[in-house]
Image (cartoon, rainbow, N blue to C red):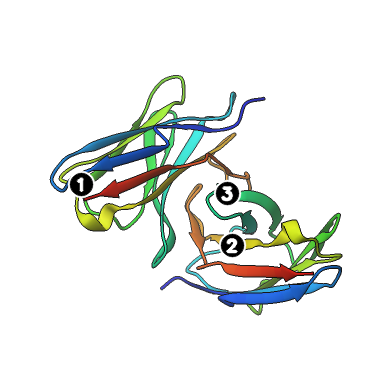
Amino acid sequence: GQNIDQPTEMTATEGAIVQINCTYQTSGFNGLFWYQQHAGEAPTFLSYNVLDGLEEKGRFSSFLSRSKGYSYLLLKELQMKDSASYLCAVNSGGYNKLIFGAGTRLAVHP
Amino acid sequence: KAGVTQTPRYLIKTRGQQVTLSCSPISGHRSVSWYQQTPGQGLQFLFEYFSETQRNKGNFPGRFSGRQFSNSRSEMNVSTLELGDSALYLCASSLSPDSFETQYFGPGTRLLVL
């Protein structure tokens, strides 16, 4: 079967660092995506990992370990506008078919 | 460059009716995917089109169908609507169907079935 797990909710303080974990078990693997989704809006692309290691993009970094079926999204210098849902998605091997986790709702407090 | 556009943005239908949703991809993008998003099930893949051909299909009943036109615009249709079809329907486009291509999402069509 296909399974992607991530925590349901997280809270953090403005200016802090937060790590959102994602574990996956899929029949195939062609890369892992992270998307951000503000309430009532469309998901927006944050990062893509297909090889093991860390990808850094400004305040956001994403890590992948294929052998462990594990990824995390690291958000630094948190801002209030980072309050959103963060979606982990795996391309399990079929063209553009993404399997999404349920999403992690992050609340950033002053 | 304009993003993915979807019409209509909001729709109210009654059980048993059918509905057609439209998606215009980013200019130059030839692959279009459709997803259903509900609070209980999250984002679920419906189907994907490239060069007017359905390349992949999710686990949805045959009431859900779609097509893609030669200009890459896509439509999805849901027949015999059920209450459980109430959801946000998202369209995403990418340059090609290659697995490493980023999919860019439209704002979605929020469908309410009464």
User: Which residue in the protein does label 2 denote?
Assistant: A87
**A66 up-or-down from A48: above or below:** below
Determine which of the numbered discs, if any, sits on residue B63 in the image: 1
| Point 73% across, 56% down: residue | A81
Whole-number angstrom distance, CA of label 3 to CA of label 2? 17 Å
Whole-number angstrom distance, CA of label 2 to CA of label 1? 27 Å
Q: Residue B16: x percent and y percent?
A: 13, 45
| Point 33% across, 45% down: residue | B111
- Looking at the rendered structure, the secondary structure element under dot 2 is strand
Extreme residue toward the top, this view = B71
Q: Are marks 3 and 2 on the same chain?
A: no
Q: Chain of mark 3?
A: B
| Point 32% across, 39% down: residue | B11
State left or right for residue A46 relative to residue A29: right
| Amino acid at the residue labelled 2 | Leu
Mark 2 Cα-neighbour bin, 10 Å: few <14, some 14–19, many ≥20: many
Q: Quadrant of the N terminus of chain A?
A: bottom left
User: Which residue in the protein does label 3 denote?
Assistant: B99
Q: Chain of mark 2?
A: A
| Amino acid at the residue labelled 3 | Ser
Q: Chain of mark 1?
A: B
